[in-house]
Image (cartoon, grey):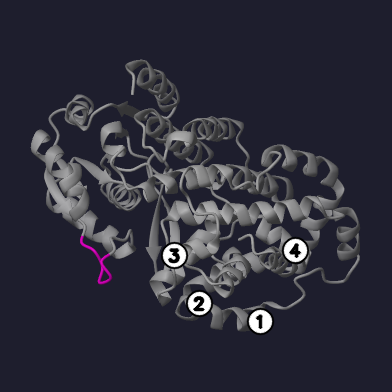
Amino acid sequence: MSNDGISTLQSVLQRHGATRALHLHLVDRLAEAPALLRRHYPGQRYTVVVDALTAGLAGDQIALAVGAGMVTVAPRRDGSVVAGRVEAEQVTRQLREQNTQVAIAVGAGTLNDLTKFASQQLGIPACVVATATSMNGYTSACAALLDGGVKVSVPCAAPRLVIAPVDLLCQAPARMIAAGFGDLRSRPVSGADWYLGHRLLGTPYAAEALHLVDAAAHLASASVAHLVERTPAAIAQLAAALLLSGMAMDIAGTSAPSSGGEHLISHCLDMFHYAHGGPQDLHGCQVGVATLAAAHLYERLLATDVLSLTSQLTSQPTPPPEESWDDLAQRLAPHFGSLWATVQPVAREVHGDADHRRARLEVLRRDWPTTRRSLRDILGHDPVSTRDLLLAGAPVRFVDLGLSPGDTRAALLHARFVRARYTILDLAADLGMLETWVDELLATGGL
């Protein structure tokens, strides 16, 4: 990539990073990373956190250059390296034993999450050298950990220093690059879900965070035509977009700006993979396909006579879902199986009560013309388009992720119970239309 191209993106990252006291460096070569680490944290005891793969890619080189210790995260029995509560506590203990003053993750999502969590526990700064443009969590102020079979978001400080070496990022597998684009492709529906929660529940909505998400989406769109070729310019644009998207979550104090119902569907697939051996793909690949499903549900919502439907529902003694919590729990428990004990408290919160559902529907009915226009603006003119995902080499159907029609239906109907975040999945359920709309979507065969 040209120096001018790197400099332009770097200036964007520096300007936004400065507002959060984050040092973001997009550099041409991995060889530049050790000097940046020493410049920002001189004379410290460093420990590099790696797995067997990233140690050979960059971890050994960085550890040698800065005189760092090393923590290697071991895989589980199936060979996968997982950001779980057990692994997080092990990394914390090993960093403490090495008297670490600065922890450096060399990797992508899993190692970054483990290092952020451990650094938060120890009160030390976390840094990261990115090895793949596979997800947007590098600069987020939370760690996604598998705890009791359920993905939970644990608040923690964002890495103070992020180094993204373009030469290394260009070597990442094509599927990981596609996953990074898929993670950012969620912007229309995650943005719509964030707005929907704000309108119906009064949850916070930060204009500054929305601006960053839009900037990230613009950079990602500019990169998509050349991601499959892995050109340095396209990879650098995608890397910058992912860093900005993560910062939006930090600014908002929640992952909501970049994570809506589509992410819940991905989390649900992850949970069933680890608990029951269900199919699983990279997080961003799952998010990309789930985004298309959520976008179809939004299009179905916008085509519905919401005023008439909500008038009918709010005039009933008990608006949908009509089943009691006890009946719902009896239905959900067999589906979640061993996960139910962990999911149950969240599902109970999501189910809520008739009075709160009625209140949401009344707000929706009262403000529907304004809400509809805003949702249309956020979603854009064609949120169900598969064009950009295909250009990026990303999957666009659930079958591409290894899911059967039954697996897909179950994920779309039950994902809303794994985290208490209001999304199009919840609104469709409030309207009594989720099952109908999901079945209509699956009947088309497009997903």
Q: Amino acid at mark 1?
A: Asp
Alpha carbon distance from label 4 to label 2: 22 Å
In the rendered structure, which disc, 2 or 3, sits on the residue that comes first in sequence? 3
Alpha carbon distance from label 4 to label 1: 18 Å
Reading the image, the residue beneath label 3 is 270
Q: Amino acid at mark 3?
A: Asp
In the rendered structure, which disc, 1 or 3, sits on the residue that comes first in sequence? 3
Alpha carbon distance from label 3 to label 4: 26 Å
Start-end of magenta stretch = 74-79
Q: Kindly indicate whether the residue at mark 3 contacts the one at mark 1 (C-beta within 8 angstroms).
A: no
Above/below status of 32 relative to 383: above
Secondary structure category for the residue under label 4 = helix
Q: Alpha-carbon neighbours of circle 2 within 10 Å: few (<14), some, or many (≥20)?
A: some
Looking at the image, the residue that sits furthest to the top is: 4
In the rendered structure, which disc, 3 or 4, sits on the residue that comes first in sequence? 3
> Which residue is rendered at x = 62% and y = 57% of the image?
293
Label placed on residue 340: 2
Q: Nearer the viewer, mark 1 or mark 3?
A: 3
Query: In the visual, does 49 lie left or right of 10?
Result: left
Secondary structure category for the residue under label 1 = helix
Q: Quadrant of residue 375?
A: top right
Reading the image, the residue beneath label 4 is 430
Question: Magenta stretch: residue 352 in it?
Answer: no
Label placed on residue 431: none
Image quarter (top left, top right, bottom left or bottom right) of the N terminus: top left
Q: Amino acid at mark 4?
A: Asp
Label placed on residue 326: 1
Q: Quadrant of residue 348?
A: bottom right
